[in-house]
């Protein structure tokens, strides 16, 4: 059966596909002290293999430096030091509440007008990233049936970013020891893990992989349609690595068993079962955080319910003449999760109101100097997070009865919500508390792959046309009001891809080009429900208008130079609503040991909180990679 894709994206430079379309690009990694903990696990697995008989070993790896220099003076607005309201004088106006009969309650002041100024100082960072990465691959071949593979990865990010407080770059409280994955150790500025630790067994048409692994069913540059088994780890460089690497460094690996059986040359069946592991978010006040840091996220609360769950799935691939088709069915916990309000559990009194802290602990709010200071800030950041500030306020009041003890009440419109919010913010800034939960879902998908045969002189000869489609019934989404009642809708996702190698001139090697289109019926590229899009106003206007669908186009071109020492890259992601992420790049590989790469991430958004690029519009940067291979 022919390969699913005609692509050999990087060839001898480290790009290629292994069985089932899994990326096996050799990617560098970073290390800090303490790599010994992971090395012991690696060597232990190899020793286990060695006991089976004479083993051929191969060890290779990389060490790489990865700086990313900011191209503008714009700071990440989702962090404390980049908050748009730092040092800005804002009016707080709660006088509208005085029109309510019986207001104010006995012992409370009337609504009034005042001003506030968020006292946290800004930052002037020159770098988003200055990481050292090390990767060591251990390959072991026992016999024609058994092989083993382990990858030891380390990543060190020193304190070159001017953050608020002393944030943890990598600690994530999923598994013991604040580990985001089972095979990981980390500290404030470093992480070490084993993204691969598995044994492969093959015997004729049968192939089985046991152990910690990524399952990569997708081959798109920006989009994930059939690529559903694993979530993503966004702690290192968000989604701003080289586009052509297709999430190879971001997919979260997890222990599991994956196998396939080739029934004939034209038919293959694959199945997997794997321990559930959530996607991993960038931590608050780190360079690439994209959830407003005025929120506290209760990570453990939701994961405890999902810990130990297994994802399962199957895929059938078949060849019908010139058309390759595949079908998938997956039952999984959604690794991205959904969010809703939760009790803060923090007992800190509102100034001048003794005992109010015990009440606040039963609500989604906490007295904190790192919280929200005004209704204007509340509604601005609700829009940036694709939430509804008005219904979100009412949900927090209605679903947490303790708020009534503080004389909070649901309101009929945004103007009254702003007045009531300012009334509380005149007393104290407040942080919001949310939790992240992981709902089980079924995903069904189809794909087709066709290679055009139009004669050697035609531009369309060997053009690869690929389409993918998934259907997820009753999918759960975060509600824009952060209610515990989630949005539940059927979601359809479809993509159409054109890939082509073409030699425009005999002086240069063939150019690789790919053009992609993505349609999603209910959520954007980041999984946010479309009903939260488009909040553009201030404290009294401009609530989310919503969108009917998400549509995006991606294009990439890659051109090697005649001596194969240089290669030029260009990629662009365009959101039909008006945003683009552009990534030009250049690679220099003078010999087998050394590689130097430079690429820019240029984010352009027309504003309005209705395109995905608006979320990363601050992230313009020039990134470098200097790699030594050993």
Image (cartoon, helix red, strand yellow):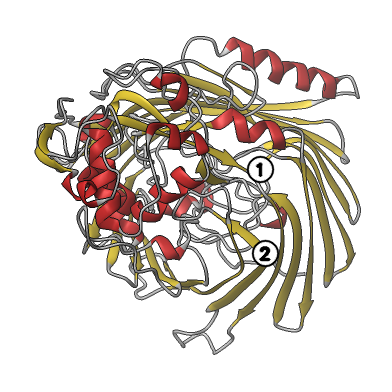
**Is residue 37 shown above or below 466?**
above
Q: Which mark is residue 214?
A: 1
Q: Residue at x 84, y 31 (%)?
A: 142
- Looking at the image, how many numbered discs can be counted on the residues? 2
- State if disc 1 and disc 2 touch (CB < 8 Å): no
Residue 41 at x, y = what percent? 70, 17
Horizontal side of residue 308 vs 194, given as left or right: right
**Is residue 379 shown above or below 1?**
above
Q: Residues within 10 Å of mark 1 (few under 14, many from 20)?
A: many
Q: Nearer the viewer's eye, disc 2 or disc 1?
A: 2
State which quadrant residue 165 falls in. top left
Q: Is residue 585 visible?
A: no
Residue 362 at x, y = what percent? 51, 28
Q: Residues within 10 Å of mark 2 (few under 14, many from 20)?
A: few
State which quadrant residue 164 falls in. top left
Residue 251 at x, y = what percent? 57, 43
Q: Determine whether the residue tagged by mark 1 lies in a helix, strand or loop.
A: loop
- Near-viewer residue (349 or 619): 349
Q: Residue at x 44, y 32 (%)?
A: 405
Q: Which mark is residue 474?
A: 2
- Near-viewer residue (184 or 380): 380
Residue 495 at x, y = what percent? 54, 72
């Amino acid at each position: 059966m022919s390969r699913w894709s005609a692509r050999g994206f990087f060839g001898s430079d480290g790009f290629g596909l292994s069985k089932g379309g899994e990326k096996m690009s050799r990617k560098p990694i970073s290390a800090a002290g303490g790599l010994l903990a992971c090395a012991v696990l690696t060597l232990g697995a190899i020793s286990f293999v060695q006991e089976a008989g004479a083993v051929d070993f191969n060890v290779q790896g990389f060490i790489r430096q990865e700086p990313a220099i900011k191209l503008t003076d714009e700071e990440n607005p989702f962090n404390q030091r980049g908050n748009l309201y730092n040092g800005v004088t804002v009016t707080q106006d709660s006088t509208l509440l005085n029109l309510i009969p019986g207001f104010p309650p006995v012992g409370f002041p009337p609504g009034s007008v005042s001003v506030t100024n968020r006292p946290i100082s800004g930052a002037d960072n020159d770098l988003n990233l200055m990481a050292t990465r090390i990767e060591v691959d251990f390959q072991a071949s026992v016999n024609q049936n058994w092989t083993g593979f382990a990858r030891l990865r380390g990543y060190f990010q020193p304190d070159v970013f001017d953050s608020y407080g002393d944030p943890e770059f990598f600690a994530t409280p999923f598994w013991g020891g604040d580990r985001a994955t089972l095979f990981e150790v980390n500290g404030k500025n470093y992480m070490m893990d084993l993204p691969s630790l598995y044994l492969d067994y093959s015997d004729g048409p049968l192939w089985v992989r046991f152990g910690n692994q990524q399952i990569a069913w997708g081959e798109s540059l920006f989009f994930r349609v059939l690529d559903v088994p694993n979530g993503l780890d966004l702690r290192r460089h968000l989604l701003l690595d080289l586009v052509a690497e297709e999430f190879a460094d971001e997919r979260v690996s997890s222990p599991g068993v994956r196998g396939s059986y080739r029934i004939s040359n034209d038919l293959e069946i694959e199945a997997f079962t794997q321990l559930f592991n959530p996607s991993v978010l960038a931590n608050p006040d780190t360079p690439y955080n994209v959830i407003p840091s005025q929120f506290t996220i209760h990570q453990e609360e939701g994961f405890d319910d999902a810990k130990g769950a297994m994802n399962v799935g199957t895929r059938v691939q078949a060849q019908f003449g010139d058309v390759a088709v595949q079908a998938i069915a997956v039952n999984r916990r959604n690794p991205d999760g959904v969010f809703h309000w939760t009790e803060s559990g923090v007992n800190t009194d509102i100034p001048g109101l003794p005992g109010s802290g015990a009440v606040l602990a039963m609500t989604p709010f906490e007295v904190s100097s790192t919280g929200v200071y005004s209704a204007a800030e509340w509604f601005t950041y609700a829009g940036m997070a694709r939430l509804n500030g008005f219904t979100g306020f009412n949900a927090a009041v209605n679903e947490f009865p303790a708020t009534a003890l503080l004389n909070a009440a649901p309101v009929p419109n945004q103007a009254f919500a702003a007045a009531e919010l300012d009334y509380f913010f005149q007393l104290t800034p407040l942080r919001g508390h949310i939790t992240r939960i992981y709902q089980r879902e079924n995903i069904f998908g189809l794909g087709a792959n066709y290679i055009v045969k139009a004669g050697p002189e035609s531009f369309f000869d060997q053009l690869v046309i690929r389409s993918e489609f998934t259907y997820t019934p009753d999918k759960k989404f975060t509600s824009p009001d952060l209610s515990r009642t989630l949005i539940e809708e059927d979601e359809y996702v479809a993509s159409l891809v054109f890939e082509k190698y073409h030699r425009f001139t005999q002086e240069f090697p063939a150019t690789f080009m790919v053009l992609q289109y993505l349609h999603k019926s209910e959520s954007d590229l980041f999984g946010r429900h479309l009903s939260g899009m488009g909040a553009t106003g201030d404290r009294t206007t401009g609530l989310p208008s919503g969108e009917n669908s998400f549509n995006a186009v991606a294009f990439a071109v890659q051109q090697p130079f005649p001596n194969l020492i240089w290669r030029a890259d260009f990629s662009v992601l365009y959101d039909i609503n008006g945003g683009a992420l552009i990534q030009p790049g250049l690679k220099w590989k003078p010999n087998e040991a050394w590689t130097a790469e430079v690429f820019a991430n240029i984010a352009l958004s027309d504003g309005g909180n209705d395109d995905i690029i608006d979320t990363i519009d601050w992230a313009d940067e020039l990134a470098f990679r200097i790699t030594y291979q050993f």
